[in-house]
Structure formats: structure tokens, C-alpha cells
């Protein structure tokens, strides 16, 4: 695992956007796995700026979601499908056909999970998976004590994660869905390159346990230690509890 400490979130965004741009120059139809939440936004903004400036051609790039809320109505602005379309697909000028994600509105959620794992494999696997990290150490929505071998499946969000995400739902925890579909940790580990971005002091404890603690299901992000090509990008605040 490689750990890169950057001064701030904007610098982390630039660094990872450049890694994505370099990947797209080598592999124009690379499959980029994208996380949602606040942390990755500087990455998407920096990558879109490179596309606008002509520094990289993303027209053949493909994008896939990491996770999705279950039960939000189609087109809800906070469904992760809507977020990825708004923050990634549109700014990069991609066709919505270049984008895939799990169906959080499926009548048969388990079948939708299996179908998503199959679709990722049929697409040739994820070339670079961008990850955020929860304050409790989750990646995707693999909450603490998720199996390190897990596949895409339905999960129940912890109270802490629902509190953390209420800011996207007018601050009202009751509006935050209780269930999600998430790529499993085993699924995530199949990506060829994992890049985790963590910014702010609130992530410092989770980062320290991820990087310096034992590999343990109680800290799902610690599974990155098992991956042959994992990069953890942290700003100084998120690095503040590293030894
Ligand atoms: C969402 C996801 C989550 C977030 C995490 C941190 O797709 O994968 O693991 O990355 O909850 O969220 P932020 O960045 O909002 O602190």
C-alpha cells in the first residue's frame, strides 16, 4: 500500500485526476469506478477541467458506480445514479450508455446485485476504483464487520452513516434510506488499482486504522492492505493520527 500525503483536498483531487487522465491516455476506454459523497468531488472537478482544456480525451471512458441507495424513487436527486450523472458523466461529456450501476429500485434486489457483479466482470473489470472512507472505516457501504470476501449485496446502513449522510437529505435522518446495494469488499478488491481519498480530521482515526491497524473486518478499508496496487491519498488533517 502506498500512502501519499497532500496539503489539502484540492491537491488530492489534482493528483488523482492526473492518475485517471494518465490511465485514459493509455487505455481510452478504461472503466473508472466512482464513489459518491463529498470527498471525491475535487477529483471529478479536476478531471473535467483537464477534459475541457484538451489535456485528456475522455470520450471513450466508462464509469461504474460503487453503491446505491435502495428504495429512492427513480430520478431522486440524491440517488447515486443521479449524483454520478450530475458530477461525473455530464461534466466529462460521456454518454449515459457509458455508465453502469446497480438497480436500487429493482423488485428483486438480490438478483440486481448478482447482475451487477456479472456486468462488472463482463465489462472486463474495473481499471481504477476511487474510494472514500466512512468515519467508521467503511468503503462503499461495507459497514464494519462486513466479510472481506463479500460480493455485491444489500446492506443495512449503521446509524452513524445515516447521521453522516443526513446532510444530503435536508439534515433529516428520517429521509436517509436504511438500505443500500454496495459492491462487496471482494468485488472492490478485484479492481486493478484502488485509490482511496480521505480528507479532513474526521477521517483521521479511520485512516490510521486502515493503514497501520491489522487487516480486520471491523475496519473494512483495512482490506486495501491485501491489494497489490492500492494508493491511499490523505490530506494533512486526515493523516494527523498516522504514526
Ligand atoms: C459512497 C461511498 C462511501 C463514501 C463515504 C465517505 O459512494 O462509497 O463509502 O465514500 O461514506 O463519504 P464522504 O466523502 O461524503 O465523507
Image (cartoon, helix red, strand yellow):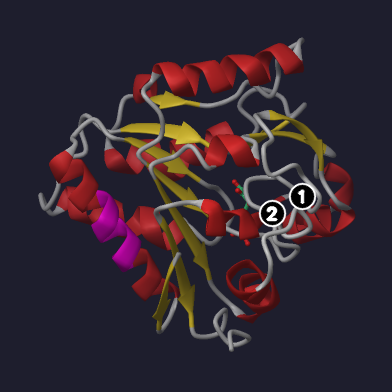
Count the labels in the image.
2
Task: For label 2, count other residues whose C-alpha is less than 10 Å away and answer few (under 14), some (14-19) or many (20+).
Answer: many
Mark 1 CB near ligand 1 (8 Å cut): no
Mark 2, residue position: 220
Distance from disc 2 to disc 1, alpha carbons, whole Å, reads: 7 Å
Please, is residue 94 above or below residue 53 in the view? above
User: Please, what secondary structure does the residue beneath circle 2 have?
Assistant: helix
Q: Could you tell me if residue 77 is visible in this image? A: no
* Quadrant housing the N terminus: bottom left
Q: Quadrant of ligand 1?
A: bottom right
Mark 1, residue position: 143
Q: Position of residue 211 (x, y in %)?
A: 58, 71
Q: Position of residue 195 (x, y in %)?
A: 43, 56
Q: Position of residue 32 (x, y in %)?
A: 37, 39
Magenta segment, prevailing SS (helix, strand or loop): helix
User: Please, what secondary structure does the residue beneath circle 1 have?
Assistant: loop
Q: Could you tell me if residue 39 is visible in this image? A: yes
Magenta-drawn stretch contains 68: no
Highlighted magenta segment, given as a residue range: 14-20
* Sequence-first tag of 2 and 1: 1
Whether tag 2 and tag 1 are in contact, CB under 8 A, the answer is yes
Q: For this view, does 23 lie left or right of residue 33?
A: left
Mark 2 CB near ligand 1 (8 Å cut): no
Amino acid at each position: 500500500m502506498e500512502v501519499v500525503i497532500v496539503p489539502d483536498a484540492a491537491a488530492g483531487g489534482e493528483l488523482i485526476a492526473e492518475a485517471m487522465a494518465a490511465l485514459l491516455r493509455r487505455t481510452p476506454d478504461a472503466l473508472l469506478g466512482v464513489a459518491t459523497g463529498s470527498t471525491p468531488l475535487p477529483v471529478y472537478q479536476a478531471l473535467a477541467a483537464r477534459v475541457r482544456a484538451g489535456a485528456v480525451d475522455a470520450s471513450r471512458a466508462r464509469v461504474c458506480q460503487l453503491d446505491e441507495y435502495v428504495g429512492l424513487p427513480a430520478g431522486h436527486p440524491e440517488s447515486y445514479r443521479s449524483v454520478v450523472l450530475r458530477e461525473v458523466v455530464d461534466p466529462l461529456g460521456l454518454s449515459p450508455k457509458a455508465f453502469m450501476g446497480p438497480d436500487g429500485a429493482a423488485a428483486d434486489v438480490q438478483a440486481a446485485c448478482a447482475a451487477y457483479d456479472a456486468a462488472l466482470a463482463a465489462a472486463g473489470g474495473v481499471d481504477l476504483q476511487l474510494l472514500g472512507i466512512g468515519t467508521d472505516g467503511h468503503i462503499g457501504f461495507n459497514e464494519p464487520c462486513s466479510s472481506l470476501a463479500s460480493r455485491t449485496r444489500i446492506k443495512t446502513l449503521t446509524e452513524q452513516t445515516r447521521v453522516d449522510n443526513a446532510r444530503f437529505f435536508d439534515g433529516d435522518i428520517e429521509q436517509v434510506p436504511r438500505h443500500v446495494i454496495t459492491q462487496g469488499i471482494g468485488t472492490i478488491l478485484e479492481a486493478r488499482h484502488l485509490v482511496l481519498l480521505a480528507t479532513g480530521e474526521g477521517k483521521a482515526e479511520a485512516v490510521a486504522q486502515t493503514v497501520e491497524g491489522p487487516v480486520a473486518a471491523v475496519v473494512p478499508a483495512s482490506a486495501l492492505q491485501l491489494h497489490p496496487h492500492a494508493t491511499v491519498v490523505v490530506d494533512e488533517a486526515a493523516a494527523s493520527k498516522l504514526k
